[in-house]
Image (cartoon, coloured by chain):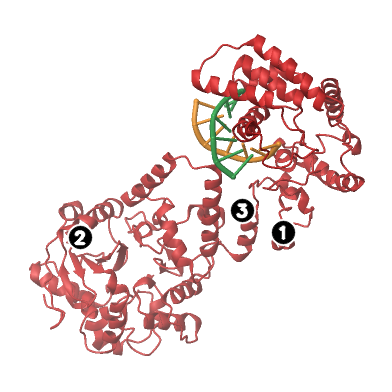
Chain colours: A red, B green, C orange
Amino acid sequence: MEVDGSNSALVNKSEENDFEKKGSSDPVVYQLVRVEGDGTLVPATEDDVLEFEHFLQDEKVNFPSIEDVGHVEEFFSNDCILLKKSDLEDGSSKVKTLELHTQKMGTDLEENRLDGSLGPPSNSGVLHGQQPDKFLAEQGDSNIAQQDNASTETAKPIVLNDSCSAEKDKADACSRPVDDTSTEPSVSGVTSYVPDFSILRGEVCLDDLTIRELQEAFRATFGRQTTVKDKIWLKRRITMGLTNSCDVPSSGCVVKDYKIVGKDVRQEVSNTGGIPKIGLQSTLVRDQVTYPGNEGDSPSSSYYQSEDQQGSSKRFKRVPIHNDEPQGNLLAGQCTNKRTRKPTKRYIEELSDIETHESTGKLSSPAKRTAHDEVLLKPRAAPFHELESLSTIYPTRKDTLGGFSVHVPYVSRMRRGRPRKDFISFVDKEPSVQCNVQTTVGMLSKECEEGNHVRKASEVPPTVNPERGHLEAVDRKGVQNLQANVYKAASKPKIKRGLTRKHHRAWTLCEVVKLVDGVARYGAGKWSEIRKLSFSSYSYRTSVDLKDKWRNLIRATQTQLPAQKDGVCPRKINPSIIPIPPSILLRVKELNELQSQGGGFTAPVKFSGQNSKVVQGKGLGFL
DNA sequence: ATTAGGG
DNA sequence: CCCTAAT
């Protein structure tokens, strides 16, 4: 078939889908046609067919027949647009054509079409108008009634997108009145300068409209002209206007009867077998993304944003789309794969963060977004209401302002880095401050006792640490108050953890010795045991602590020791810092090597005992 | 709940 | 010490 001299191309009726024929009572023929950027119609290639085959199948399965007089469905694929044009329900027309458009159509071609619509039918205009006919003719199919339909007009497909569809109707297009009242969907010649309000009725697929058409639509919708040439913007605005909703995807949406259609296929399927306006689209169209969170979340939680396209496309990859279509499954599969790999918590957070921002960028209403972000911004997302007071604490001034009224000192905010030296959990100590918590007190006292009992005088007393100045005490009180409140309110250990930090307790030589001894006895790694058996009196030393300390000791062994051996002290020994006696380090080294080498080992209790004694003596001397 | 490691 | 992943 020759569409045009330059753009001529043969349209093969090539791909007929068998299932289509046998499937429905009224014979329908699908044809796949690739439309090149220049508007040329090219026979669909094998690949094209394959690519869209499943669509057709799905369609068949899911969408029995067309309710509307006619309509066009678009399916965007990587680089093709599949148009399904359906004809009258009454069967006057039984030919359906599938056309593949290269993506170009969305760009260059669009422009061309614009021109074309106004001028001679040269390219895409032919696409919908002539082509089908030609196609039919070529096919020699007797069923063809496309033209009849066109002329008949009642059944004219409402292919808004192609202004050109009107090409052939050009003649009548002019004469066609702008009929606002007419209920029948009409394509009408958008070519005319008269605002075509018909564009607003019935099913409208804005995606196919040219900029000019969109502008017309905009004009028709809002009663004013626009010079905006951003298709996305136009589409969105129009859709919003038509639907009176903000929940509009950037594209891929079809507006019908003043409602957005196609977001959820099932909604639009009628009992009589009406075909959903956009069935597959949601899964195929790049721009259109069904954002799960949005569906149940908040009905109107999207808003216009210029850069949403990127975001959406991004999301497209990872957001599972709830559809029955294979694509959906595919996506789902991808997601599954993703899940296979276990992301770290942090990773998840980041991801969700991004996602959220994207989503907010695209779908969330400003209002919601604020709230949303707020939640997300919280370092450790804890959307619990109880924690709100706490949550709001995060550092960002902005958030604080816009967020809840509860303002908590930044201090209380969990911090990544090391807290102030004196920053300790109120629970940890100073029960006197205000906590009536007896358990705490008891614990502390006990701890203290133990600590004191075992510890040397130099050790930090469990109660107020002498090291701390008054300043600190005061400061801390305030903080503690807050913390206490927060803690009470939240009553979640996790939070407490996040907020409070274990009081730093310097390891005493005694402890180190015990640790070494324990390692010697039970082996490195048996921290739990060591803690139980050797650190029963040091309740504040956890197995993790032991482990960490041991690690540090080893490190010291690898650095400090050699230097000392060499007799060269890398740096002056800070008097305030009691160096670990070389003897201990040596032993640590030995143990480390021993254990790392031999793997299993038998604890030389004697040895350890001896050493510990020796060390202790030394240690005492030092301390 | 522990253990191993990175921070 | 904290935080997490992996057991």
Q: Secondary structure at mark 1?
A: loop
Q: Is residue A538 visible?
A: no
Residue highlighted by disc 1: A403
State which quarter of the image contains the C terminus of chain A.
Answer: top right
Across the whole image, how many numbered discs are drawn on residues?
3
Point 52% across, 70% down: residue: A305
From the viewer's perspective, tell me whether residue A318 is left or right of residue A461. left
Point 72% across, 37% down: residue: A492
**Residue A312 position (above or below residue A172):** above
Residue highlighted by disc 2: A48
From the viewer's perspective, tell me whether residue A343 is left or right of residue A535. left
Q: Decide: few, some or many residues near mark 3? Use Cα within 10 Å; few <14, some 14-19, many ≥20.
A: many
Residue highlighted by disc 3: A376
x, y percentage for residue A66? 29, 61
| Chain under numbered label 3 | A
Point 16% across, 79% down: residue: A7
